[in-house]
Image: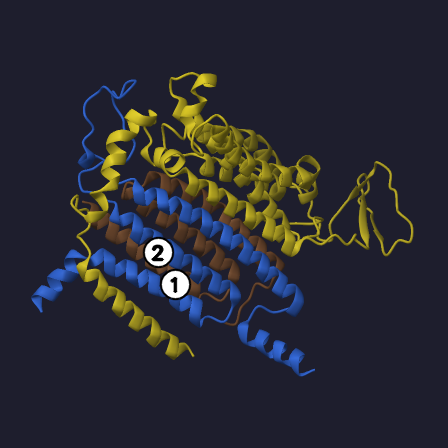
């Protein structure tokens, strides 16, 4: 029991990230309104990005911008890799944020189009109106 | 030192996310979503990911909130759930 | 339905938590993510490219094909928004407001085209009186926002920033103009055709730099083949700057296109 507690205390941040992801997933599945589903999708995306970026963190390391006397050609002090944070997750997540905003834009356009056609954004009312159309 | 401020801002983030999907007014959802984006940006700035924090500040808390408010303006503002 | 989804979510969360038990501790410098390739990038980026910002160096030089396809994705999103919502049917009823007296003319279903004099202005259905404070403050702030956006694009090599961030800030300065004045005010200055050409030109600039490197005899997006034209010194940093400018152009245009189409439902007449 105490070792379970020690495990949770050492990795508490992963627990909180998983909780955030599950909030987003719940909103995507269970909410009725289309806009709330979109908010849930975006919460899920940013929680995954947070999880990924936290992997690249190193204690006692600085931001990944090399400063100081780098000079021309890099003939300064030797660059120690443990002094700088890992830049690779940052790069990949930059692309992920760009893609998420593009997806949000197109999804909003789809919501506006659905509202123009059916005058509602709630999922159960949409289903009712769609089934009425098919019955005719 | 990192762990305490991280814990506090993570609690804020979770509260903002829960609030954003719970309220029944879509404009309030848009604003809470902007606040959630800002808190995420702070979290990444503390972890040292300055480029990612800059992008999230300009995209999530800027343009994304504007798109949301524009879409709410053209559809309905109340929601049943 | 909600109870079922709650159970599914809790099960998934439990599985994920069980999986995190094997992950390395937070901040461990010996974690596998920080060992193999990123050490090479950290130690050799200055020597190869002479750009201090490691994230920009990896994004625009070592992994530049990813960024090119991400720009293409942003362009496709703008295109999709335009194709979904744009409505070219002309407006049926017009409202005109006589500026000196405030009288409003409502013309419904004109058979012929209506031409008004200079004292009338076009107005939306929901017209608000112009607010002096908002107009003045936004009018004074917008040039500074645009200069800041260009600064962020140009200094992506030395400080946090880059093409994408600067492009979003420049796009939001145009959106601020549309919000504080009028959507038609923005569309008179920045026409839709210009935005469409700008967004495609951004992707074209990126691919053009890559293809021209191939024509000059190297690999795709090999910046070192431009050395006979621009000089040997800092050639990879200059190639990165050109590529970031392409990304910035495309992102600016796409943000403004998406905003205009969402807020006016494709008709480009009224807005927020």
Q: What's the chain of the residue with tag 1?
A: A
Instruction: Check if mark 2's residue and mark 1's residue have beta carbons within 8 Å.
Output: yes
Horizontal and vertical percent for residue A93? Answer: 37, 47
Name the residue at 43% across, 79% down.
Answer: C1
Per the image, the residue denoted by label 2 is: A47
Name the residue at 49% across, 71% down.
Answer: A32
The answer to whether C196 appears left or right of C160 in the picture is right
Horizontal and vertical percent for residue C157? Answer: 38, 28
Tell me whether marks 2 and 1 sit on the same chain: yes
Q: Which chain is yellow?
A: C
In the rendered picture, chain A carries what hue?
Answer: blue
Q: Quadrant of the C terminus of chain A?
A: bottom right
Q: Quadrant of the N terminus of chain A?
A: bottom left
Per the image, the residue denoted by label 1 is: A24
In the rendered picture, chain B carries what hue?
Answer: brown
In front of the other: A14 or C67 = C67
Horizontal and vertical percent for residue B69? Answer: 55, 54
The answer to whether B73 appears left or right of B44 in the picture is right
Farthest residue to the right: give it: C112
Q: What's the chain of the residue with tag 2?
A: A
- Is residue C154 among what the camera can see? no
């Amino acid at each position: 029991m105490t070792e379970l507690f020690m495990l949770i205390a050492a990795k508490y941040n992963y627990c909180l990230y998983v909780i955030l992801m599950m909030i987003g997933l719940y909103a995507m599945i269970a909410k009725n309104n289309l806009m709330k589903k979109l908010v849930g999708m975006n919460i899920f995306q940013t929680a995954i990005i947070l999880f990924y970026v936290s992997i690249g963190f190193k204690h006692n390391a600085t931001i990944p911008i090399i400063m100081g006397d780098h000079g021309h050609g890099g003939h300064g002090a030797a660059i120690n890799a443990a002094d700088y944070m890992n830049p690779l997750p940052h790069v990949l997540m930059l692309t992920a944020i760009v893609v998420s905003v593009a997806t949000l834009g197109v999804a909003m356009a789809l919501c506006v189009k659905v509202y123009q056609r059916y005058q509602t954004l709630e999922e159960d009312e949409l289903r009712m109106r769609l089934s009425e159309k098919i019955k005719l | 030192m990192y762990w305490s401020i991280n814990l506090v801002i993570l609690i804020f983030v979770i509260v903002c996310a829960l609030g954003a999907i719970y309220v029944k007014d879509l404009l309030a959802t848009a604003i809470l979503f902007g606040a959630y984006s800002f808190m995420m940006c702070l979290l990444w700035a503390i972890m040292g990911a300055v480029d990612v924090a800059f992008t999230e500040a300009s995209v999530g808390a800027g343009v994304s909130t504007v798109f949301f408010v524009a879409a709410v303006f053209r559809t309905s503002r109340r929601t049943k759930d | 339905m909600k109870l079922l989804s709650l159970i599914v979510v809790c099960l998934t969360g439990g599985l994920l938590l069980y999986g995190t038990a094997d992950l390395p501790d937070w901040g461990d410098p010996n974690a596998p993510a920080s060992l193999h390739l990123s050490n090479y990038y950290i130690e050799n980026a200055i020597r190869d490219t002479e750009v201090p910002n490691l994230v920009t160096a990896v994004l625009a030089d070592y992994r530049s094909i990813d960024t090119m396809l991400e720009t293409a994705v942003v362009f496709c999103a703008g295109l999709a928004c335009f194709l979904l919502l744009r409505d070219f049917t002309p407006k049926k009823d017009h409202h005109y407001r006589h500026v000196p007296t405030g009288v409003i003319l409502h013309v419904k279903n004109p058979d012929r085209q209506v031409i008004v004099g200079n004292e009338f202005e076009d107005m939306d259905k929901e017209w608000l009186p112009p607010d002096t404070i908002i107009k003045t403050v936004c009018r004074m702030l917008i040039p500074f926002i645009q200069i800041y956006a260009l600064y962020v694009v140009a200094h992506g090599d030395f400080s946090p920033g880059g093409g994408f961030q600067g492009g979003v800030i420049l796009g939001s300065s145009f959106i601020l103009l549309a919000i504080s004045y009028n959507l038609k005010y923005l569309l008179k200055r920045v026409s839709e055709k210009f935005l469409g050409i700008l967004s495609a030109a951004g992707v074209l600039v990126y691919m053009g730099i890559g293809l021209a490197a191939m024509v000059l005899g190297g690999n795709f997006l090999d910046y070192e083949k431009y050395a006979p034209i621009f000089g040997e010194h800092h050639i990879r940093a200059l190639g990165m700057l050109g590529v970031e400018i392409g990304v910035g152009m495309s992102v600016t245009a796409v943000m403004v296109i998406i905003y205009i189409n969402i807020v006016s439902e494709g008709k480009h007449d009224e807005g927020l």
